[in-house]
Amino acid sequence: MKVVVIGCTHAGTAAIVNTAKLYKDANITVYEKNDNISFLSCGIALYVGGIVKDPLGLFYSSPEKLKELGVDTRMKHEVLDADLDKKILKVKNLDTGVIFEDNYDKLIITTGSWPIVPKIEGIEFENILLAKNFYHSNTIIEKSKYAKNIVIVGAGYIGVELAEAFERNGKNVTLIDSQDRILSKYLDKEFTDLAEEELKKYGIKLALSQSVVRFEGENGKVKRVVTDKETYDADLVILCIGFRPNTDLFKGKLNMLSNGAIIVDEYMRTSKEDVFAAGDSCAVIYNPIKKHEYIPLATNAVRMGTLVARNLVKPTTKYLGTQGTSGIKIYDLNIAATGLTENMAKYYGLDAQSVLIEDSYRPEFMPTHDKAILKVVYEKKSKRILGSQILSKVDLTQMMNTASVCIQNEMTIDELAFVDFFFQPHFNKPWNLLNIAALKAI
């Protein structure tokens, strides 16, 4: 069985390693445009902020490791065309310029995503950077050494994390977003208000409900960011607007969402026989709405890549879907979320209700008993749990992994009220915070 894998980051690495282990007779070839693989881009802010000293720690595999598994890893090779009927690929060696053909029995598409780069006047100026791969992180660190005023466009997870990292490095930071709140896709207002206060406390300027209309520069370098409301000085601009699937090669050849995310079934199969896909290039089954959505997360990618390998020869293990569970640390605040926010539930047209509590995470007789704020969102008629969010100074984020399981198993708010959780005064109260929220709801 000849297996060809296109792209090698989270999903690709997982698919390759598991395919090599499961099918000893498989002939595996990997084509990767870059000269490195498996970079954890979610660690860029940690690297920029100096928390991670050695960037090599952000790589969890290498061509050498894959070679030990018998994998033929072709770095700096770009797939130019794919005939999915004849199972033939056209490939270019980016070092030599030589173009050749290759064939496959099974094709695994793990081409990932790429940052969205809007067509804004002046975007060609120097020092306007992206934040996706290893080279971006090195460039950001090098350029930021000489920058006083740094503007970040996009207040999602990466943008917020970079804002904190730059502020800790002594920079003047402005965070711009067209939405009226930071992290608006992941958290409701009760949580983003507290997160915004934390950022402001450290001097980060929030420029919300503003859209960038142009960049202005001098001597070829960016100097100002102009929005529809204000102008901001900028020696360095980081674009963190979001990601799009890197799937142009397969447009018109595979079923996709409107944004280009490849649609796969529960066994990671695409609409073409013997062609599988995983990771940021794909749409995932989003359990709260029971439909395909584009949710590019490393966790989704490694699960999907592993499932590709298990289902490569015959359907074996179903994908359970995702809740889009995620977390972030903003200075002293530990924040996590899973499933739908109340705001997003309304966006999807669901008749949702929510319950919000603020309570000590453990008994008040303990020396410390910090407050936590917890929200659970559920469907009004069915009582099915749709999402949850938590924020506290003590780390309670694992509670959202528990809530994620509840959503995945279609539990109701009534059931959550009486789920069995342990009690130990060091860690919690006789009623767990999730119990308390659900009890309040019913």
Image (cartoon, grey):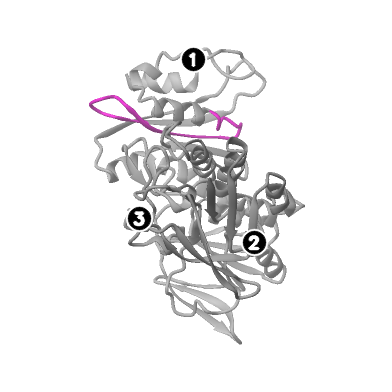
Q: With 282 as the anchor, is 30 left or right in this view?
A: right
Count how many numbered circles sit on residues in the image.
3
Pointer 1 local density, CA inside 10 Å: few below 14, some 14–19, many at least 20: some
- Residue 24, located in which quarter of the rendered image? top right
Q: Would residue 153 be seen by someone viewing this image from the given angle?
A: yes
Q: Mark 1 to mark 3: distance in Å?
A: 49 Å
Residue at 49%, 56% (x, y): give it: 155
Marker disc for residue 254: 3
Q: Say if 381 sits above or below 10 in the image.
A: above
Mark 3: which amino acid? Leu
- Comes first in the chain, label 1 or label 3: 3
What residue would you read off at disc 2?
Answer: 75
Residue 230 in the figure: left or right of residue 163: left
Which numbered mark, 1 or 3, is in the foreground of this view? 3
Query: Label 1, on which residue?
Result: 431
Q: Which mark is residue 105?
A: none
Nearest the camera: 31 or 279?
A: 31
Amino acid type for the residue under numbered disc 1: Trp
Q: Residue 397 colored magenta?
A: yes
Report the side of 224 relative to 352 (left or right): right
Residues shaded magenta: 377-398
Q: Nearer the viewer, residue 238 or 24?
A: 24
Q: CA distance from mark 1 to mark 2?
A: 54 Å
SS at mark 1 in the image: loop
